[in-house]
Amino acid sequence: EAKAEGRNEIRQYSGELVAKVSSHLSIQGDLRRALDNNEFQLYYQPKISTHDQSVCGFEALVRWFHPVKGMVPPDQFISVAEDTGQIVELGTWVLETACEQAKLWLDEGLVTAKMAVNVAARQFKEKNIIDLVRKVLKRTGLPASSLELEMTEGVLMADPNISNIVAVLRSEGVSIALDDFGTGYSSLSYITRFPIDTIKIDRCFVQDITLGSDKAAIVSAVTNLSHTLNFNVVAEGVESEEELEVIKALECDEVQGYYYCRPMSADDVTEWLKNRQAQPVSVISAN
Ligand code: C2E
Ligand code: MG
Ligand code: MG
Ligand code: MG
């Protein structure tokens, strides 16, 4: 009976594997077509200062508008694109498009804040990312000081050479943010070893945070050490006023989350920025 059970498990497991591989293959083929047909679009989500509610930056987040499936969220295709290497082509498009958009907003006087772009490990391995960033900044005319690259701890850990690359980019004025902090290999001492500008505390610590909780203790420790090291601290995924109040009390510098804004298309951001400009700061409400 044990054997039969084992066989069942194997059958079930291989069934899942087949499903996974075939969905992987279909996404891979779909991605090829999507890259050729420009089915991607960037959305942008603002980061808001906890000190004065000003817009401190935007994060570019890729969206896939699939002709049949509709909008496919990045969680469903970024990891496939990383496995296949297609992330290199997609990531280059994301960087160019985000820098182009940031320059437009800068020229219109709508934004002075940084544009943040997510970068995957594979982009460091397969492309000279320093040259790519230089080329894109030159072509779009965006100042290096207006660009921030977001990477997870996994990316920084992947290869010791990455911290050298990061140091070169920073010396040229580009900022570096450590994304999803707390979900990876992180220990507090670990962050002292990397040359970065910003720590983004992962949403899992922010969700339902209350004063005096374990989450609050962690956020407070990370924030204090970050400030000692001169890092800027962003809380990701703030959805409620209650969370915002705790995050403020713990002295995080910026928040990003649905409480203020969901990621928006470039046109919607432009409108949102113009409305904000037209209002005195005190009456800006969350939407
Ligand atoms: P991330 O870089 O940590 O981006 C933040 C994610 O949190 C985004 O999900 C954003 O929409 C979501 N978010 C923001 N505020 C809230 C909130 O209040 N509540 C909740 N529940 N979620 C919130 P999104 O856009 O689905 O992206 C997911 C992940 O996909 C990103 O996580 C990033 O790792 C990856 N990704 C997105 N765009 C790119 C890209 O252009 N290149 C690469 N390499 N990865 C990307
Ligand atoms: Mg990010
Ligand atoms: Mg994140
Ligand atoms: Mg994430």
Image (cartoon, grey):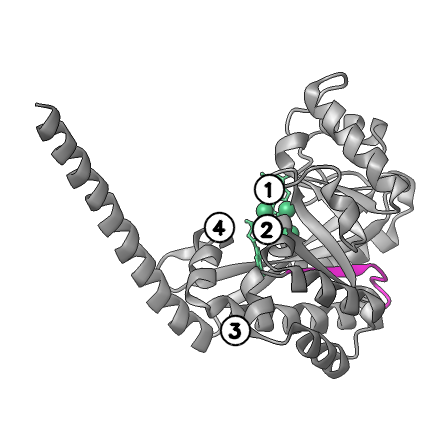
In screen coordinates, is 64 left or right of 23? Answer: right
Q: Amino acid at mark 1?
A: Gly
Q: Amino acid at mark 4?
A: Asp
C-beta proximity under 8 Å, tags 2 and 1 = yes
In this view, the mark in front (2 or 3): 2
- Image position of 149 with respect to 99: above or below: above
In screen coordinates, is 161 left or right of 106? Answer: left
Q: Quadrant of residue 92?
A: bottom right
- The disc at residue 154 is 2
Disc nearer the start of the sequence (4/2): 4
C-beta proximity under 8 Å, tags 1 and 4 = no
Disc nearer the start of the sequence (4/3): 4
Question: What whole-number distance in Å separates the C-alpha atoms at marks 2 and 3?
Answer: 20 Å
- Residue occupied by mark 4: 75
> Under 8 Å from ligand 1: the CB of mark 2?
no
Question: What whole-number distance in Å separates the C-alpha atoms at marks 4 and 2?
Answer: 16 Å
Quadrant containing the C terminus in the rendered view: top right
- Image position of 283 with respect to 71: above or below: above
- Image position of 267 with respect to 135: above or below: above
> Under 8 Å from ligand 1: the CB of mark 4?
yes
Q: Amino acid at mark 3?
A: Glu
Disc nearer the start of the sequence (2/3): 3
Q: Nearer the viewer, residue 27 or 225?
A: 225
Question: What whole-number distance in Å separates the C-alpha atoms at marks 1 and 4?
Answer: 17 Å
- Residue occupied by mark 3: 89
Q: Residues within 10 Å of mark 3 (few under 14, many from 20)?
A: few
Q: Is residue 115 magenta?
A: yes
Which region is colored magenta? 109-118
